[in-house]
């Protein structure tokens, strides 16, 4: 589950990570009143207004702006709230901004320079260990840094038996070129951040930038936090942080129906049982020159009700021009599935307005094929995978 910046920062803060403080608003008037409260709490007179959407690169798209008065807070909030924010990480249509974060200005002048760093925590799947990845090159795309100056990216792997050790936190601070108070504060920051990562069951923390203020404090200015869905049962209080406005509406609906659906850009709808077969099916469609419109795993029970639900989900995507059903009958018999398809089709009638190609393989595949072929419906059947993919191409061309 992905979180908004302000939600991620709240979690960080609960574990003692210093953050750039802020308050959330969903209208310009509310932004002004929240800014006043922030002024009372922190003394800040300048405010950073930040669009809250599940995408990075907001600064580049005009979703992060500095306001130097309450009047500017109002006018900038008016611009940002409700806008379609397009960033390098959104689609071409962008994302609607529903909320903004009004944050204290932490780039104030002082005895030393401000410095921006990059820091993330994630699982290194190759070693099976959590890893802190960090760089002196904060505030910019880490992909660009990795591409152009890979030497400036450091990693620290954590042994799960010992947890993060003090010398490792010191090495982070050292590699970031810090000394004195900032060095000490960075080691504290790294410890708190790692504790937050583990205790919140996160699968990703990305803090870009981590800021060293001009008076040598270390804090998180941005926060991309992803919580591992499989651990959400341990964090009931995080469930309410989900913002389904940020998710694909068809995927949300499929989730409620217990279907594993991922929306893609092509025009061939896929209905498959099992995630491995779904991926193989998408490969085959691609190889035959087509383009999958989705990934849909109906799971173990492909009965009429489930097939019908799956049809309805796939057909919500207007770019679907054909549907390929590819089912392997191992535990579930193919003739059962075929009957399910025929029943669902009859039940839906005209609602199915694209050609359907069914490939059933496994137990009773031949009986299933006869069942489909004699149903009188506009469904083509195949037993071989390649034959099915070719038929898809035929109906599309
Ligand atoms: P992103 O563009 O989505 O990654 O959003 P960030 O939260 O990282 O903010 C983008 C940029 O806004 C940062 O890299 C900073 O340069 C700038 N910024 C953030 N907070 C402040 C602040 O308190 N004062 C000033 N002057 N700039 C800020
Ligand atoms: Mn950022």
Image: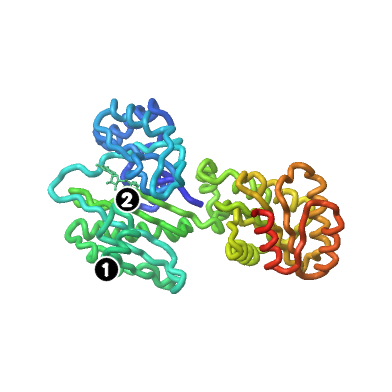
- Residue drawn at x 32%, y 50% is 220
User: Mark 2: which secondary structure?
Assistant: strand
Locate residue 266 relative to residue 366 in the image: left or right: left
The residue that mark 1 highlights is: 151
Q: Which quadrant, please, contains the C terminus?
A: bottom right
User: Mark 2: is the Cβ under 8 angstroms from ligand 1?
Assistant: no
User: Mark 1: which secondary structure?
Assistant: helix
Tag 2 near tag 1, CB within 8 Å = no
User: Mark 1: is the Cβ under 8 angstroms from ligand 2?
Assistant: no
Label 1 packing within 10 angstroms: few (<14), some (14-19), many (20+): few
The residue that mark 2 highlights is: 220
- Residue drawn at x 28%, y 36% is 47
Where is residue 250 drawn, in percent x and y? 61, 45
Res 366 → quadrant? bottom right
Closer to the camera in the image, 275 or 353: 353
Which comes before the other along the chain, label 2 or label 1? 1
Where is residue 60 drawn, in percent x and y? 33, 45
User: Looking at the image, which residue sits at the far front?
Assistant: 397
For ligand 1, the image quadrant comes to: top left
Res 152 → quadrant? bottom left
Q: Nearer the viewer, mark 2 or mark 1?
A: 1
């Amino acid at each position: 589950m992905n979180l908004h910046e302000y939600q991620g920062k709240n979690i960080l803060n609960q574990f003692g990570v210093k953050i750039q403080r802020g308050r959330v608003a969903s209208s310009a008037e509310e932004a002004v009143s929240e800014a006043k409260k922030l002024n009372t709490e922190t003394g800040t007179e300048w405010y950073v207004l930040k669009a809250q959407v599940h995408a990075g690169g907001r600064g580049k798209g005009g979703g992060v702006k500095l306001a130097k008065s309450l009047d500017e807070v109002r006018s900038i909030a008016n611009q940002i709230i409700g806008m379609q924010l397009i960033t390098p990480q959104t689609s071409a249509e962008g994302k609607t901004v529903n909320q903004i974060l009004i944050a204290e200005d932490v780039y104030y002048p002082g005895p030393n320079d401000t410095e921006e760093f990059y820091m993330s925590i994630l699982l290194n799947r190759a070693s099976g260990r959590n890893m802190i990845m960090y760089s002196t090159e904060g505030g910019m795309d880490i992909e660009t840094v990795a591409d152009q100056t890979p030497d400036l990216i450091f990693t620290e792997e954590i042994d799960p038996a010992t947890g993060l050790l003090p010398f490792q936190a010191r090495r982070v601070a050292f590699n970031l070129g810090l000394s004195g108070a900032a060095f000490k504060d960075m080691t504290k920051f790294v410890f708190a951040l790692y504790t937050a990562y583990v205790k919140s069951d996160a699968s990703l923390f990305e803090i870009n930038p981590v800021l060293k203020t001009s008076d040598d404090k270390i804090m998180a200015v941005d926060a991309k936090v992803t919580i591992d869905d499989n651990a959400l049962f341990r964090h009931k209080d995080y469930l309410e942080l989900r913002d389904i406005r940020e998710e694909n509406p068809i995927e949300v609906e499929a989730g409620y129906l217990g279907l594993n659906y991922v929306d893609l850009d092509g025009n061939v709808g896929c209905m498959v049982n099992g995630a491995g077969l779904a991926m193989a099916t998408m490969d085959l469609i691609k190889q035959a020159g087509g383009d999958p419109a989705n990934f849909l795993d109906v799971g173990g029970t492909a009965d009429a009700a489930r097939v019908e639900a799956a049809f309805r989900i796939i057909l919500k995507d207007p770019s679907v021009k054909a549907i390929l059903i590819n089912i392997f009958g191992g535990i579930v018999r193919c003739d059962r599935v075929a009957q399910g398809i025929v029943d669902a089709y009859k039940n839906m009638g005209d609602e199915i307005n694209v050609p359907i190609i069914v490939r059933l393989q496994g137990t009773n595949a031949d009986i299933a094929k006869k069942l489909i072929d004699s149903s009188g419906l506009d469904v083509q059947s195949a037993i071989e995978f390649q034959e099915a993919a070719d038929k898809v191409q035929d109906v599309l061309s």
